[in-house]
Structure formats: structure tokens, C-alpha cells
Image (cartoon, helix red, strand yellow):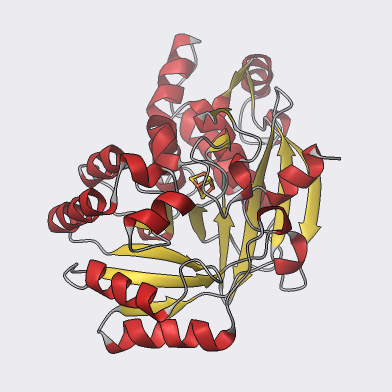
Amino acid sequence: MQDIKELGLKELEDKLQSLGLPKYHARQIFKWIYQKGALDFNNMSDLPAALRKKLAGEFYILGLELADLQRSSDGTTKFLFELKDKNLIEAVNIPAARRVTGCISSQVGCKFSCQFCASSLKGFKRNLTVGEILDEALYLKNNTQQAELTHIVFMGTGEPLDNYEDVLKSIRMINSPYAFNIGARRITISTSGIIPGIKKLAGEDLQIELSISLHAADDKTRSQLMPVNKRYPLEALIKCCHEYIAKTNRQITFEYILIKGVNSSLPSAQNLVKLLKDLRLAKVNLIPANPITALKIIPPSKAEIGAFKECLFKSGINVTLRQERGQDIQAACGQLRLRYENK
Ligand code: SF4
């Protein structure tokens, strides 16, 4: 049995033709799965019964099962899924005014070992397939509470640019008017700073958003927080960002988690200003750390956060302060999976 979501529209049309079936049914099938949320071929009422039977013998639609769920008082819902090989992954639905953002994973575990993240504590297992990534998006779409799923961010477990081909193919499906039909500007890739991936992304014909986890403006601190910095240090990363902006004319958002005693002082803010001041189309998103007991991560005081933000703002940096969502349900990446696997 094949996961039907591994096939793009053209591939499904070709597959139907190879089975001796008219290719126009592919668009109907896409509509049923990605727009009407059908999880059973039998429910696709405008398809001939013989075709439904044939499809059910060739394909499955949803490959994951819900293993656990936590709902926060702020409406954020975190899902823990079990894949066919029993591996566990997490995805989160984050509602806000007139929008719902789905945060999805791209790998099982992670090899990049960022110090503030629980995702790599159990190491890296494997990449997710296109079908598995779309499983997450489909499940989130079918299980929003008040509004439609409007945005997708690759900010769950894993480094999306380390699973480039499957992530890009899934993004094309999320963006396709025949599938999820979510606008490219509502899809964000968040990377730890994989330079070859950013360069490749700059050449894609997709207007998606790029977000880079920065978290420090000097190599010593960043290498401690994010070992990937030893391979792709700040000077090379920022040079790559200049090239990306010149080529795409698109803004880059720099995520900066404020961690008490590590990167939240005024000199750290001044270093950040120096690093980014010449970068056209840059935005800094400050995020007070989500406390992770296992990793001894603590957010700074409100006064320290305010002073950091003020320093950036006064220096002309486009800066926002994001409140972590779902703090009461261990919504930071990897925490639910970790708790579940440690049971
Ligand atoms: S922040 Fe991202 S890249 Fe870093 S360990 Fe977590 S999942 Fe991996």
C-alpha cells in the first residue's frame, strides 16, 4: 500500500492513467483529501464505486495516529503522533485572531543539538517523508477549533533544510490551489542557519517566508547554544543572508530566544545591532525562553527583556516581542515527545 500523499497532482494523474483510469479524477481526489478532509476513499461520493474500491486497494490516506493531546488555556493544542514505524513526532495548532498557525515537524529527532531545545535530547532518528509531513498538516487542518488552518510554520522538531527535498515538495502541496491552497507568504521555514540550504532556497520560485534561529550575536555564545554555528559561523551566515535578500527581495526574520545569564544583557543587544544593522529587510523576533527544567533554561526578567528590545528599536532594527504560547502544556519543541518516551 502506498501513501497517496507522496504523489503530487501530476504524479497522481500519471498513476491513474497507468491503472487504466481517467486522469481527471486526480483533481477530485485532491479536493476530497486536502480541502474536504476525507480520510476514507469510500466517502468520496462523486467518484465511481469501482474507482473508490481500486484506490482503497492501492493507497492509504492518513499514515499517523494520535498518541496524545494537550490543550492549553490559551487555545494552543499540541498533538503527539505515532508514525507507522512507531516513531513519535509532535505538531501544534496555535490559534490567534482570525488565524490558526500549524507548527509542524520535519524530522524524527534532530541532529543539531541546540542547547535550548528538547528535540535532540534523544538524538536523530530519520527524516520525515512528504506523506508524513502532509499527514501533520492534514491532521491539524481537520482538527482546528474555531477557524480554518491559515498558516504553516516548519518550527517543530527537526531542521527543515536538512530534509530539503521532502520539505520543499510538501510545501508545494501545501501551497497548491488543488491541495491545501495556503498562500506561500503564509508558509515559513525556520532554520538553524544551514547555509547551503538557504542558498538553494533563494533559487526556488516560491515566495515563502524564511526565519533563522540566531539566538546570539557572537560566535562563542552562539556555538555554545547552537553547535551548528561551528560549521556555519556568523560572518558566513550573515553574508549568505545579504545574498538571499539581494536575490529574493524578501525579508528574513531572526528568531532570538532570550535566556537569562546567557544572551539577554545590554552588550548582547548591542552586538546584535552591529551584526544586523546593514542587513536590508531584516526583522528580529525576541522570544523570552520557555522554561525547560531538564535543560536549566530560564527567561530573563521583564525589565531586562524591555531594555534589550529598546536597544534594538532605538538603533532602527525592526523588532517584535513574541510571547511563548502554550506554556502550560510543554509546547516548546520536543518536550511532549520527551515526556512520553521517558514514561
Ligand atoms: S532548535 Fe531546531 S535545529 Fe535546533 S535542536 Fe531544536 S529542532 Fe533541531
Q: Is residue 292 left or right of residue 96?
A: right
**Residue 45, quarter of the rendered image:** top right
Residue 256 x %, y %:
44, 66
Q: Quadrant of the N terminus?
A: top right
Q: Quadrant of the C terminus?
A: top right
Front-lying residue, 290 or 249: 290
Residue 170 x %, y %:
45, 38
Residue 28 position (above or below residue 181): above
Front-lying residue, 4 or 122: 122
Residue 156 position (above or below residue 65): below
Residue 332 position (above or below residue 65): below
Residue 157 x %, y %:
57, 44
Residue 122 position (above or below residue 17): below
Instruction: Determine the residue located farthest toward the right in the rendered image.
Output: 343
Front-lying residue, 44 or 231: 231
**Residue 161, quarter of the rendered image:** top left
Can residue 242 be seen here? yes
Can residue 169 be seen here? no
Q: How many numbered marks, from 0 up?
A: 0
Q: Residue at x 19, y 58 (%)?
A: 245
Q: Is residue 312 left or right of residue 7?
A: left
Q: Is residue 269 left or right of residue 48?
A: left
Q: Residue at x 50, y 48 (%)?
A: 180
Q: Residue at x 68, y 23 (%)?
A: 49
Front-lying residue, 232 or 245: 232
